[in-house]
Image (spheres, grey):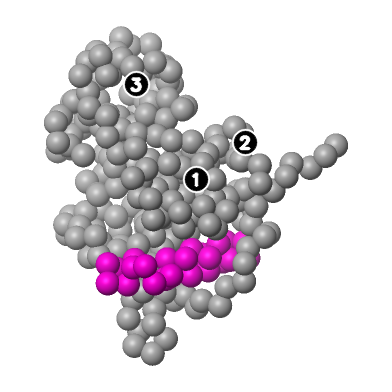
Amino acid sequence: MSLRPRSAPPTATLARRIEDAGLNASAPPQQAYVDGWLLRLSPGKAKRARCVNALQAGRLPLPDMLARCRAAFASSGLPLIVRITPFTQPPDLDARLAVFGWQRFDETRVMAKVHLDDLPASSASLRRVDAATYAQTVGQLRGSAAEQITAHTERLLGSRIPYQGYLLEDARSATLLACGQIAAEDGLAGLYDVFTPEVQRRRGHARQLCLALLHAAREQGARHAYLQVSDDNGAAIALYESLGFQLAYRYHYRSEQPGVA
């Protein structure tokens, strides 16, 4: 039996595993189920922690499902957002929401690096920090509200998939150059919250950081890596492709409330 070439794209099986790993890694303490749909109700900034994931087709009529979800999100002070993936059930949910006039936004790529045994060498030295420090650091860089930073910290501390936050700093001045996290599960390492301060961009720091994160993940037993990136972030996509990441699948969100994105 011949081996798959290293340039082969992620398989459907790996894509499904990545989706499951991503759901596990992004689970907030505030969540509930409605007839097979997973409701995530965190007040944090990340939409993946404050949206509906339609995991099963369910038995309720769609208007009833949406009404129950709407009530749950309203009670948490959140707008109702539905995440649409290739794994969404029922499969025609996206089309049905479009008929209802729900807006589509935040087109996102999930990318995978199928092999981690072909990494270029890395000489970058990272400093590991605790969850609270990381959430505060990246939150301030993104301009997140205090409530969102608190919710991010809570989610990181409560995650059953341990997060590892790292900072890439200037060796002399300790100036922050870039930051990122690893969330590893069952041979899969997710890269999360990768961020470079605006004044440090286009200097190769993000590449150094990501390569060092991948090395750290491989040393901990990871065989594959994945990440999520906005479809309109061409610079980041080019960086990840240069590191060997390929498209696994796409997802987007829909909401009935204008301007919720």
Determine the residue positioned at 36% across, 74% down: 177
Q: Which corner quadrant of the image does residue 218 belong to?
A: bottom right
**Is residue 199 one of those drawn in magenta?**
yes
The earlier-in-sequence mark between 3 and 1 is 3
Residue linked to disc 1:
111
CA separation, marks 2 and 1?
12 Å
Identify which amino acid the numbered label 2 is placed on: Thr
Point out the image quarter for the N terminus: top right
Q: Main secondary structure of the magenta part?
A: helix
Residue linked to disc 3:
94
Determine the residue positioned at 45% across, 54% down: 238
Residue 211 place in picture, x, y as percent:
53, 65
Residue 24 place in picture, x, y as percent:
46, 43
Which residue is at the front of the view, 49 or 233? 233
Identify which amino acid the numbered label 1 is placed on: Met
Residue 75 can be seen in this image:
no
Identify which amino acid the numbered label 3 is placed on: Asp
Q: Is residue 90 left or right of residue 47?
A: right
Residue linked to disc 2:
11
SS assignment at label 3: helix
Determine the residue positioned at 47% across, 75% down: 126
SS assignment at label 2: loop
In the current view of this chain or complex, which residue is farthest to the bottom? 172
The earlier-in-sequence mark between 3 and 2 is 2
Residue 141 place in picture, x, y as percent:
25, 65
Q: Is residue 258 above or below residue 213?
A: above
Q: Residues within 10 Å of mark 1 (few under 14, many from 20)?
A: many
Count of picture labels = 3
Point out the image quarter for the C terminus: top left
